Image (tube, rainbow, N blue to C red):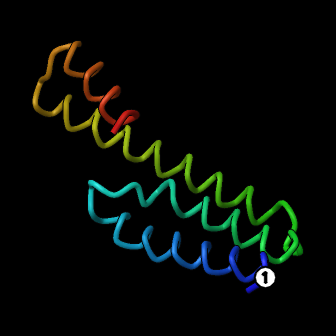
Amino acid sequence: MTATDLFWWAALLVQLLAIPGTVVPVLPGLVLLPLGALLWCWAIGFATGWPTLLLAGLLLLLGWGADLLGVLLGAARLQASRWAYVGAAIGLVVG
């Protein structure tokens, strides 16, 4: 098995782990998707160029932004305190 094969299998494994992670809150699916794209690009010698990785990174940031917005809107709807907002934002980043 060559190094390219290892990168292919690692990219496939990371992508397969990311799929349930997009709906199961415990798994970090949003982070694993760009990581899988990076491994895949590495396996093919970056033949797709930087736009693929840039798009994966932008989608990661968009997902994080949507997640943060959902947390903040949920806290606002429940009339949470300022410390609840801070705790929710920290919890979003940490875990």
Residue 18 at what x, y percent from top left? 44, 67
Task: Say which element carries label 1.
Answer: loop
- The answer to whether residue 17 is above or below residue 53 is below
Viewer-closest of 35 and 3: 3
- The answer to whether residue 72 is above or below residue 49 is above
Residue 6 at what x, y percent from top left? 68, 77
Residue 27 at what x, y percent from top left? 34, 58
Q: Residue at x 79, y 67 (%)?
A: 42
Residue 29 at what x, y percent from top left? 42, 60
Give the residue number, with chain letter if any, for mark 1: 2
User: Where's the C terminus, which quadrant?
Assistant: top left
**How many numbered marks, from 0 up?**
1
In this picture, residue 58 sits left or right of residue 76: right
Q: Farthest top residue? A: 82
Viewer-closest of 52 and 17: 17
Q: Residue at x 38, y 38 (%)?
A: 68
- The answer to whether residue 34 is above or below residue 90 is below
Q: Residue at x 34, y 71 (%)?
A: 20
| Identity, as a three-letter code, of the amino acid under mark 1 | Thr
Check disc 1: other Cα within 10 Å, few if <14, some if 14-19, many if 20+: few
Residue 47 location, quadrant: bottom right
Q: Residue at x 54, y 64 (%)?
A: 33
In this picture, residue 6 sits left or right of residue 94: right
In this picture, residue 55 sits left or right of residue 23: right
Viewer-closest of 13 and 38: 13
Residue 12 location, quadrant: bottom right
Q: Farthest front residue? A: 1
User: Where's the N terminus, which quadrant?
Assistant: bottom right
Q: Farthest bottom residue? A: 1
